[in-house]
Image: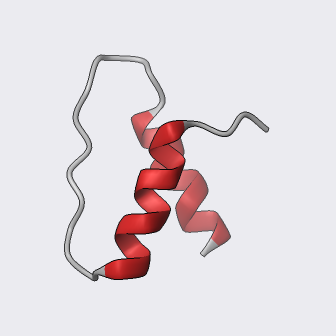
Amino acid sequence: MLNRHVDNIIEHHYATTNKALLLSGARQVGKTYAIRRYAQQA
């Protein structure tokens, strides 16, 4: 599985706070995929 920089950001954010996280970026770069993968692991 490919580990991306956004995966580390998501993990760090939810480890330190319970607030919402807004991911923005270009289309088709894996934003939704990264969030769904994190949700399955948690």
Which residue is found at the position 49% from the left and 64% from the top?
A: 11
Q: Quadrant of the C terminus?
A: bottom right
Q: Give the camera-side residue of 8 and 24.
A: 8
Q: Nearer the viewer, residue 30 or 12?
A: 12
Q: Nearer the viewer, residue 39 or 14?
A: 14
Q: Is residue 23 left or right of residue 35?
A: left
How many marks are shown on the rendered structure? Answer: 0
Classify residue 21 by image quadrant. Answer: bottom left
Expressed as whole percent of the image width and height from the top left, the position of residue 36 reads: 52, 53
- Quadrant in the picture for residue 29: top left
Specify whether 3 is left or right of 25. Answer: right
Most distant residue in the right direction: 1
Q: Position of residue 5 (x, y in %)?
A: 51, 39
Residue lying at 28% horizontally and 81% vertically, measured from the top left: 17
| Looking at the image, residue 28 lies above or below residue 39 | above
Give me the residue at 35% from left, 67% from top.
13
Looking at the image, is 39 positioned above or below residue 17?
above
Q: Is residue 7 above or below residue 28?
A: below
| Location of residue 23 in the rendering, given as x and y in whole percent from the top left corner | 26, 43
Q: How is the image coloured?
A: secondary structure
Residue 1 coordinates in the image, percent (x, y): 79, 38
Of all residues, the one furthest to the top in this rendering is 27
Residue lying at 22% horizontally and 35% vertically, measured from the top left = 24
